[in-house]
Image: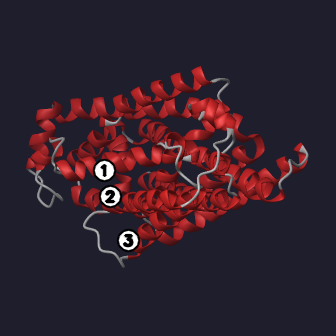
């Protein structure tokens, strides 16, 4: 993707299929997803403020205004620089909190024993320490669903597109993946420790979004704990500003320049980017306050975009026979399955089934329509990049 040196994922789709309709539909689905995911980050920020005794809604508004301000004023470069610092602060903060929490509770064995003595847990205590407690099928579906979005998310690709060359993009992706795998166990441990160390575990179970901030405060106390809570907030904001920047790129590049068909002067684009950043940020704040659920926002956001765009993008890159008619039909069919699943019209036992079912329908429709329609010659630049 970095070889193509584009700005957005929908732009790559238009390049591959020579269809503005596909680009606009993909940009719309991606923009809706980004707004929802950003709303989840806003709601997570409110949990941090709740944990330190401040009004959650006021905290969400304050955090949103902060990352809107520096993203609007400075763009992707500011996002990259602040994220670099924020992810270091957030990672060190949660790592230290978990280590000290484990020392306080008596290690992993002490944590397991403490959880075993707490009644009212959502699942038996021993299942918290089993990697396969979800069951093989649900575990596989969860991994597949996560990977599907990661492979097509504009918030991921904008950094790769902005890298100075393909080698830098490749190394960055690999190092980031290794870091994520190394850190992934700590949020889970933090949630368990929050329950174990809380004097009121029922409150943590009833309000899981405040679990990690509560852990930090219970381990470090009020003053020092507030510093580490700021680290958690830094991690949240490092995700939020990236999503905001990605959403802005859709409005400016895919909708404005994509529809106008010409590149405007730099000052005009800068003003548009700033206004769009503010508007999208406020819209996400509204979505967070309306739905008031982190998981719900993420599910609704991921499902429709991934179900519609994943197959047309991946098949388009690796299957020369794919046609624009097939891609458009597959995109519509996959998104429709996701919408019906999220609305409850189609009954799925777990939300992960929505991803996979939508993608399967998208693939079947796309392949069938592509076989029945005439294939156009692949763009020379795309051919050179992907063979």
- Look at mark 3 in the image and give the residue it sits on: 341
Instruction: Name the mark on residue 364.
Output: none
> How far across and down, in percent of the image, does residue 256 sit?
79, 57
At horizontal 71% and vertical 61% (from top left) the residue drawn is: 279
Q: Are marks 3 and 1 in contact (CB under 8 Å)?
A: no
* Disc 2 and disc 1 in contact, CB within 8 angstroms: yes
Q: In terms of depth relative to the viewer, which is nearer, 240 or 375? A: 375
- Say the numbered circle drawn on residue 352: 2
Q: Nearer the viewer, residue 368 or 118?
A: 368
Residue at the spot x=51%, y=57% of the render? 370
Q: Is residue 340 above or below residue 264?
A: below
Label 1 crowd (10 A; few <14 / some 14-19 / many >=20): some
Mark-to-mark CA distance, 3 and 2: 10 Å
Circles 3 and 2 in contact, beta carbons < 8 Å: no
Instruction: Say if 2 sits above or below 326 in the image.
Output: above
Asked whether the viewer can see residue 154, the reply is yes
Find residue 34 and report its horizontal and vertical position in percent: 56, 55
Left-right relation of 160 to 254? left
Q: Quadrant of residue 6?
A: top right
Q: Which residue is mark 1?
A: 142
Q: Residue at x 44, y 61 (%)?
A: 368
- Pointer 2: residues within 10 angstroms few (<14), some, or many (20+)? many
């Amino acid at each position: 993707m970095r070889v193509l040196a584009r700005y957005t994922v929908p732009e790559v789709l238009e390049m591959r299929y020579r269809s503005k309709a596909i680009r606009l539909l993909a940009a719309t689905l991606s923009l809706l997803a980004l707004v929802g995911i950003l709303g989840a980050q806003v709601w997570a920020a409110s949990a941090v403020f709740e944990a330190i005794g401040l009004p959650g809604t006021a905290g969400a508004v304050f955090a949103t205004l902060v990352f809107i301000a520096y993203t609007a004023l400075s763009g992707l470069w500011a996002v990259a620089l602040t994220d670099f610092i924020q992810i270091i602060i957030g990672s060190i903060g949660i790592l230290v909190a978990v280590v000290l929490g484990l020392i306080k509770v008596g290690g992993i064995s002490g944590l397991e024993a403490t959880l075993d003595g707490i009644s009212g847990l959502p699942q038996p205590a021993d299942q918290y320490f089993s990697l396969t407690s979800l069951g093989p099928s649900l575990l596989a579906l969860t991994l597949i669903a996560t990977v599907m979005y990661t492979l097509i998310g504009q918030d991921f690709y904008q950094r790769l597109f902005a890298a100075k060359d393909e080698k830098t993009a490749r190394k960055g992706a690999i190092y980031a993946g290794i870091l994520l795998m190394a850190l992934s166990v700590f949020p889970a441990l933090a949630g368990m420790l929050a329950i174990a160390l809380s004097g009121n575990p029922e409150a943590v179970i009833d309000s899981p979004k405040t679990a990690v901030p509560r852990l930090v405060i219970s381990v470090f106390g009020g003053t020092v704990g507030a510093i580490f809570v700021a680290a958690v907030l830094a991690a949240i904001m490092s995700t939020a500003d990236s999503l905001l920047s990605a959403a802005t790129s859709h409005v400016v590049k895919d909708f404005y320049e994509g529809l106008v068909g010409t590149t405007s002067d730099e000052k005009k684009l800068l003003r548009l980017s700033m206004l769009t950043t503010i508007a999208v940020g406020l819209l996400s704040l509204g979505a967070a306050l309306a739905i008031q659920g982190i998981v719900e926002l993420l599910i609704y956001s991921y499902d429709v975009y991934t179900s519609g765009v994943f197959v047309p993008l991946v098949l388009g890159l690796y299957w020369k026979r794919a046609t624009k008619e097939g891609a458009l039909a597959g995109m519509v069919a996959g998104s429709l399955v996701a919408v019906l699943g999220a609305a409850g019209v189609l009954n799925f036992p777990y939300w992960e089934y929505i991803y996979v079912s939508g993608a399967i329908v998208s693939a079947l429709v796309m392949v069938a329509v592509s076989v029945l329609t005439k294939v156009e010659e692949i763009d020379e630049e795309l051919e050179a990049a992907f063979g």
